[in-house]
Amino acid sequence: MPDWITHFFIAYLIIWTISKIPKYDAALRKYYWFFIIGMLSPDIERFINLIAQQVGNEFFISIAVTITDICHSLLGIVIISLFITSFFPHENDTKYIFLTVFIGAFGHLLTDAIMWPWAGQGIHFFYPLTGPEFAFSFHLVWPGGFVPLIVTSCIVVGTIIVDLIQGNFSVLGWRFQWKGIK
């Protein structure tokens, strides 16, 4: 699975692309952070795995594996999206917040699915249906490597260079001008 930095960079690249379309940038700017939170949220299970590894109890480790399967499924991202949306009950657009977090979390599942899984594993989109016949992967990148991080880092640096040349950090809404040399 890609690390959090890679997921963040992929979310940034999607938002950067959307921000280049003025019609959508203004309408969606409020939801950018919700999309990033959604993109990172399924990996909340990593904290549970870390605690289970520290405890070392087989029961806790098996629960952590089950939580990983749940968090990386459609059922899990619906639950996670509802949980995150519950922190914004007084917003008029909670359905859009939910939808944005859900789309981000689904993007997380798709980026995790690019990994070449271990035998019989992959993303169980339809949990609780598990097993090798329900595991899905695109089989593109070997897990544990730095290829996704290096590729996304290079593309992010490219977008920053483009924004510097244009004098417009469109994602953040910052505009600036180069001062000429006198």
Image (cartoon, rainbow, N blue to C red):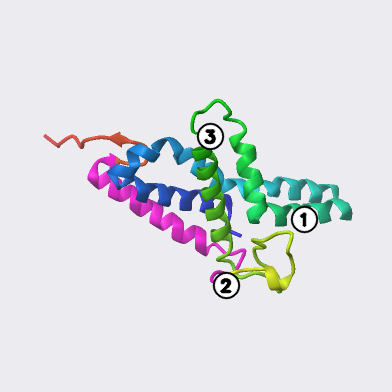
Left or right: 22 as drawn, with respect to 59: left
Q: Residue at x 30, y 47 (%)?
A: 20
The magenta span reads 140-168
CA neighbours of label 2 inside 10 A, class few (<14), some (14 to 19), many (20+): few
Left or right: 169 as drawn, with respect to 92: left
Question: Considering the numbered disc 1 on the image, is that residue within a helix, a strand or a loop?
Answer: helix
Percent position of residue 31, x then y:
45, 38
Residue beneath disc 1: 66
Question: Considering the numbered disc 3 on the image, is that residue within a helix, a strand or a loop?
Answer: helix
| 151 falls in the magenta region | yes
Left or right: 15 as drawn, with respect to 36: left
Asked if residue 56 is positioned above or below residue 150 in the image, the reply reads above
Task: Pick whichever of labels 1 and 3 is earlier in the sequence.
Answer: 1
Percent position of residue 46, x then y:
69, 49
Give the image quarter of residue 86. top right
The three-letter code of the residue at mark 1 reads: Thr
The three-letter code of the residue at mark 2 reads: His
- The numbered dot on residue 139 is 2
